Image (spheres, helix red, strand yellow):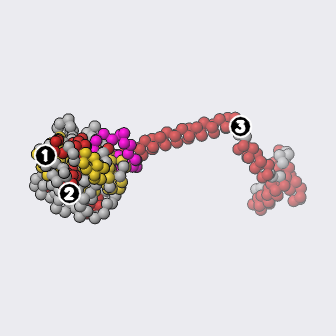
């Protein structure tokens, strides 16, 4: 058979148009090994002229984008549900992570937060270091005057206590531990700074007048300055030792008529505010001790009110005496020295009483 005729029969076979006789003819023809190569050659040619599928790239991409932007309803619903599942799963895990992070922060804060320091702890430390302490408490309903070895004055309020070491006091510095509330008038001596330890708060002065109030019901401490400058810092301050031994006032410095509250729970010293006179509760906080030809009897009455003491004197002998003096934050003993010197008198303290001896004024 001619090759051209055999090729036509094979092409008809590929097209699906071959008869049974032609199919039998092709089978017999393929029995010759050389014809097999020719058969596959015809097949390649036929497939080239008759491709099974031609892919239109442009139209195909267009359909893909249409499906993305406008998905079928079933696909859109499935996609939305999947997104919701992922979203709520994310929210749930984020909430769990937030709680764990918060609890970790609280735990770390509790572990790293310094412990509060009590009055009893400070007293025990002082006693251990010095071997002895002097403690004075006011268990009455009235203020109690306490004169320190350097003649500084403390007006101790009811339900309050102070403590210091007689051996160490006024050697290189003057240190007092306070529980409760007190007003201080500190003898000026820059070479020997004056310290008040109130729980976590340390107050340092060189010579001034101020009050400190702490209460058992709250860890908050309040400091009010009447005259001069007062330095405040906490026991946990990293520069604590430097501020204690330094010759100047470092830390948080308050000036006259300023008030500040300290929160040992958060170990913070709050922003200072100006003092409102009507908020002051102690008479000594309000008195100025400025006298211009003031009868000495009125002067002594002011001192009795301010320091909550009894001053005993001869009214008849002092009736004509007057005083001109501008006193400030001097401790009571220094005030009495100046007053008695001006009217040629003397005084002595017996318990919580001041006895003035004078022959009167000329």
Residue, disc 2: 174
Q: Position of residue 157 (x, y in %)?
A: 23, 41
Q: Position of residue 84 (x, y in %)?
A: 58, 37
Q: Nearer the viewer, residue 109 or 72?
A: 109
- Badge 1: how crowded within 10 Å, few (<14), some, or many (20+)? some
Which image quarter: residue 48? bottom right
Q: CA distance from mark 2 to mark 3?
A: 87 Å
Helix, strand or loop at disc 1? strand
Dot 2 or dot 3: first in sequence order is 3
Query: Does the residue at mark 2 contact the one at mark 3 (Cβ under 8 Å)?
Result: no
Q: Nearer the viewer, residue 128 or 258?
A: 258
Dot label at residue 72 = 3
Tell me the mark number nearer the camera, choosing from 1 and 3: 1
Residue located at (56% from left, 40% from top): 87
Q: Was residue 270 drawn as part of the magenta stretch in this picture?
A: yes
Residue located at (19% from left, 55% from top): 341
Query: Does the residue at mark 1 contact the one at mark 3 (Cβ under 8 Å)?
Result: no
Dot label at residue 355 = 1
Left or right: 316 as drawn, with respect to 1: left
Q: Position of residue 182 (x, y in %)?
A: 24, 45
Q: Position of residue 286 (x, y in %)?
A: 32, 44
- Badge 2: how crowded within 10 Å, few (<14), some, or many (20+)? many
- Which region is colored magenta? 260-284
């Amino acid at each position: 058979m001619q090759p051209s005729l055999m090729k036509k029969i094979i092409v008809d076979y590929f097209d699906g148009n071959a008869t049974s006789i032609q199919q039998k003819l092709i089978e017999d023809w393929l029995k010759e090994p050389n014809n097999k190569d020719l058969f596959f050659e015809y097949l390649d040619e036929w497939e080239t002229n008759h491709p099974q599928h031609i892919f239109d790239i442009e139209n195909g991409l267009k359909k893909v984008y249409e499906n993305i932007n406008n998905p079928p309803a079933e696909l859109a619903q499935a996609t939305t549900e999947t997104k919701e599942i992922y979203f709520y799963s994310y929210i749930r895990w984020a909430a769990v992570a937030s709680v764990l992070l918060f609890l970790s922060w609280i735990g770390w804060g509790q572990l790293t937060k310094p412990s509060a320091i009590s009055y009893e702890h400070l007293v025990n430390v002082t006693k251990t270091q010095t071997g002895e302490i002097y403690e004075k408490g006011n268990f009455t309903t009235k203020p109690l005057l306490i004169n320190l070895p350097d003649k500084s004055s403390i007006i101790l309020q009811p339900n309050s206590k102070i403590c210091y070491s007689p051996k160490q006091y006024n050697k290189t510095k003057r240190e007092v531990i306070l529980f409760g509330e007190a007003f201080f008038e500190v003898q000026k001596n820059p070479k020997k700074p004056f310290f008040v330890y109130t729980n976590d708060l340390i107050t340092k002065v060189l010579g001034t007048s101020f009050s400190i109030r702490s209460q058992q019901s709250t860890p908050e401490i309040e400091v009010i300055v009447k005259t001069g400058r007062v330095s405040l810092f906490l026991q946990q301050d990293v520069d604590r030792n430097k501020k204690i031994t330094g010759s100047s006032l470092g830390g948080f410095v308050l000036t006259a008529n300023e008030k500040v509250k300290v929160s040992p729970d958060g170990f913070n010293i709050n922003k200072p505010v100006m003092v409102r006179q009507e908020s002051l509760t102690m008479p000594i906080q309000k008195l100025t001790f400025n006298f211009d030809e003031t009868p000495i009897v009125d002067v002594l009455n002011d001192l009795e009110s301010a320091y909550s003491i009894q001053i005993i004197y001869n009214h008849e002998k002092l009736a004509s005496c007057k005083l001109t003096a501008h006193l400030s934050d001097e401790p009571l003993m220094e005030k009495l020295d100046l007053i008695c010197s001006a009217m040629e008198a003397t005084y002595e303290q017996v318990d919580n009483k001041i006895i003035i001896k004078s022959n009167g004024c000329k």
